[in-house]
Amino acid sequence: MMDAHERFLSRRGVLKALGAASGGLALSRWIGTGSTLAQEPALSKPVESFTGPGANPHWNSVGPYVTEPEKAPLLLLTDRPVQLETPRHYFSTAFTPNEAFYVRWHLDGIPNNVDMKGWKLQIEGNVAKPQALSLRELMQKFKAVSVAAVNQCSGNSRSRLQPRVAGGQWGNGAMGNAMWTGVRLRELLDTAGVKAGSVQVQFQGLETGSGPKGAASNRFLKSMDLSNPVLDECIVAYLMNGEPLPMLNGFPVRLIVPGYFATYWLKCLTWIRVLETTDENFWMKPGYRVPDTPRGDTTPEEVKAGKVNMVPIGRMPVRSFLVSPDGSSKIPAGMTVTLRGIAFSGYGRVTRVEISEDGGKNWSAAKLGEDHGEYSFRTWEAAWTPKSPGKYTVAVRATDEKGNVQPDEPVWNPGGYLWNRIEKQELVAGVAG
Amino acid sequence: MKIRVPMVVLVSCGLLALAGAGAYAELQKGHYQPATLGHLTQADSNESSPDSQYGAVAYPLYPPELETGDGKAETEGYCSVCHSARYITMQPPLPAATWEAEVTKMRKTFGATIPDAATSKILSYLQTHYTPETRKQ
């Protein structure tokens, strides 16, 4: 038996719909009389606390909402170091708000506070004129440039993999798009004068860990080849969507590597170090490596047999997402609704987004939104009418200008990287009357 | 110069740290404070002054409820030196061999200094409570 309080809670939705939630009289009438509904409405049930060993069936990861400094409520993966996922609904626009932008740190020594009087961006190593530049110098002495670029964690959607892989159990929300403004990395390197015999440039931010010196748990370091043309597109950004970066997203400056996975986008970037040898610290080898196979796909058996050649992760494969409807509401059959979402690729502009209502058998083109540049989220939308009541599996796939099309096959590799399978969402159409 | 020491307890105690190399700014980092899960209150705006200091708010800690059992104390104590025990509860249920590989990685690759006896207890605890066959919550 339910007591009066429970009955009230179970009728909350009904009362709200009648606009009678504040009326004591109406309330007592609803509690006092028998139900006029076929069955008692239930409260939404919370998501499970973990998923597995099967794939996570949800769009996002399953953690609770938490509020962190300078952030809207986001989904918790871990609290120390901080890892937070962006909820699905924030991806209905091309640019992800700063306060909703996902967070991923490797080591627990995340800056709480930075004194900009002492902070200097150091350009050191095999250079003719080592530099130590204040934020003011970065803003005043160098030309400001902007790029819209997607930042996606290498392990985004890791919770989809079968068999499951240990690591951050992200749903789809370890990604975001922002307009980044700052200084060209190339201009900074030219100012310092890269000397002959240099092979890589290493990036280090303010984060430190509690592990012993020299261990992976002490410093997070990433490097890129000086011959990589993407260095010409890199920016040392001090603005994110026209605002200073939240501390959790890398204040005061962050490296932007358009088209590449976020592992290279050093937060709180403070050291740019030109190297004469290839960096083989943990975070470059064996960390963040993928098989050199098509799509980076392999099997646990091949890995065990030592047959897989692993290379540093690089560009992001083409992906697209349905953001709304998200399946939380039933759609009356015959009603035309708007399917909306985003698409992106690290290999070039998204040129086509298609949707399917039968799980991927038949496809039709969606309308693309404004083009913010080849490295940005591209919004898309399509009108859709479920003709009769029933369950529909809506699928979405994108194609980029290099001709890469999202496949309907899963991917597996030991790091849990590079997931870009076609997304599917079940939508239910009900009887309209 | 104060240097951060490994924390066995989850609560950080306000240490000042200087960054590794070069002439460089003083900064505070690695401050965390216990918080309560399930109470999503609105955050008030923080008071700022027009000086050169940016940031300064502690990051909230949400320690998970680990399963009760032999080895829990060692697991919480040693794993929490570097990271939250949420790194355990966040995982899907993992096979016993995967937990062994994870614990080995923490010691060998990440340099966790865990005595052999405690290592066995931690591994046995994880394999008892967090595999596909055994995981409950």
Image: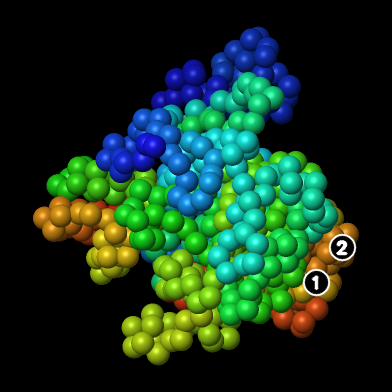
Q: Which amino acid does label 1 sit on?
A: Arg
Q: How crowded is mark 2: few (under 14 residues within 10 Å), some or many (20 or more)?
A: some
Q: Which chain does the residue under circle 1 lie in?
A: A
Residue occupying the point 47% across, 39% down: B29
- Can you give x and y, in whole percent of width and height, for residue B119 in the image? 18, 57
Q: Is residue A203 toward the left or the right of residue A167 in the image?
A: right
Which residue lies under the disc numbered 1?
A: A349
Q: How many labels does the image show?
A: 2
In this view, A420 is above or below A142 = below
Residues A338 and A20: in front is A338
Judge from the rendering whether residue A252 lies leftward or rightward of residue A210; answer left or right. right
Q: Mark 2 lies on which chain?
A: A
Q: Which mark is residue A200?
A: none
Residue A94 lies, in percent from the top left, at 78, 54
Residue displayed at 47% across by 81% down: A310
- First of labels 2, 1 by sequence position: 1
Q: Is residue A227 left or right of residue A312?
A: right
Judge whether residue A334 can be spotted in this image.
no
Residue in front for this viewpoint, B118 or A30:
B118
* Quadrant containing the N terminus of chain A in the rendered view: top left
Q: What element carries label 1?
A: loop
Disc 2 marks which residue? A371
Q: In this view, does A225 lie to the left or right of B84?
A: right
Residue drawn at the location 51% of the way across and 80% of the way down: A311
Picture quarter containing residue A305? bottom left
Please, what is the three-letter code of the amino acid marked with disc 2? Asp
> Are the two marked residues, 2 and 1, in contact with CB atoms closer than 8 angstroms?
yes
Residue A162 drawn at (x, y percent): 45, 71
Local SS, label 2? loop
